[in-house]
Image (cartoon, rainbow, N blue to C red):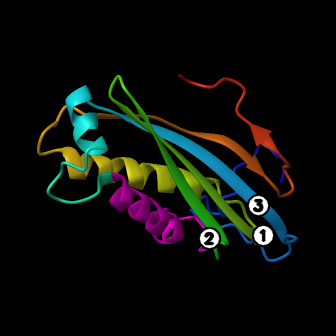
Amino acid sequence: MSSGEFTHFNQEGRARMVDVTEKEDTVREAVAHGKVIMKPETLLLIREHGFKKGDVLGVAQTAGIMAAKKTGWLIPMCHPLFLTGVDIRFSLRDEGIVEIVSRVKTTGKTGVEMEALTAVSAAALTVYDMCKSVDKDMEIKDIFLIEKTGGKSGCYRRKEQKD
């Protein structure tokens, strides 16, 4: 199969999970980004732990880690993976932006890009859920892969960073 062909279809053209049995185990890591845009007053409440539901970023971090671990259950053709590390970091920007970066690691036969993207997505959705009582106009934006290492395809680093 050439590199330009889709690998997630069988001979009948139906979806399949790719067989990775013969692939070598390598250390794999992926970093993803996302952000939640909100009113500056909402960000202030996050900073001051002013939400009755609890610590917004603490809950969002836990949700992101849990989601990364369950990616194979959420995305149909993803392999369930044994993750060896998941870290999620938040940057609070005064103009009303919560920036989220996830880093996911494993040693295995397939990459962790989807796990990193799922972690960021779940963390962003949790921020929205925790804050929607005061700001329903929040936007979840700019979810993308920053970089990935390991595997046959080697390293990838996004060329242009979004601000």
Q: Are marks 1 and 2 in contact (CB under 8 Å)?
A: yes
Q: Mark 2 Cα within 10 Å, few/some/many (few <14, many 20+)?
A: some
Q: Please name the residue that numbered disc 2 is placed on.
A: 79
Magenta residues: mostly which secondary structure? helix
- In the rendering, which numbered label is found on residue 28? 3
Q: Residue at x 22, y 35 (%)?
A: 42
Foreground label between 3 and 1:
3
Q: Residue at x 36, y 53 (%)?
A: 57
As shown in the figure, which amino acid type bears the numbered disc 1? Lys
Up-down relation of residue 33 to residue 114 (above or below): above
Foreground label between 2 and 3:
3
Up-down relation of residue 50 to residue 42 (above or below): below
Residue 67 is situated, as x and y percent measured from the top left of the image, at 45, 64
Nearer to the camera, 97 or 141: 97
Q: Secondary structure at mark 2?
A: loop
Q: Are marks 3 and 1 in contact (CB under 8 Å)?
A: no
As shown in the figure, which amino acid type bears the numbered disc 2? His
As shown in the figure, which amino acid type bears the numbered disc 3? Arg
Magenta highlight range: 57-80
Q: Secondary structure at mark 1?
A: loop
- In the rendering, which numbered label is found on residue 109? 1
Residue 112 is situated, as x and y percent measured from the top left of the image, at 66, 59
Nearer to the camera, 49 or 137: 49
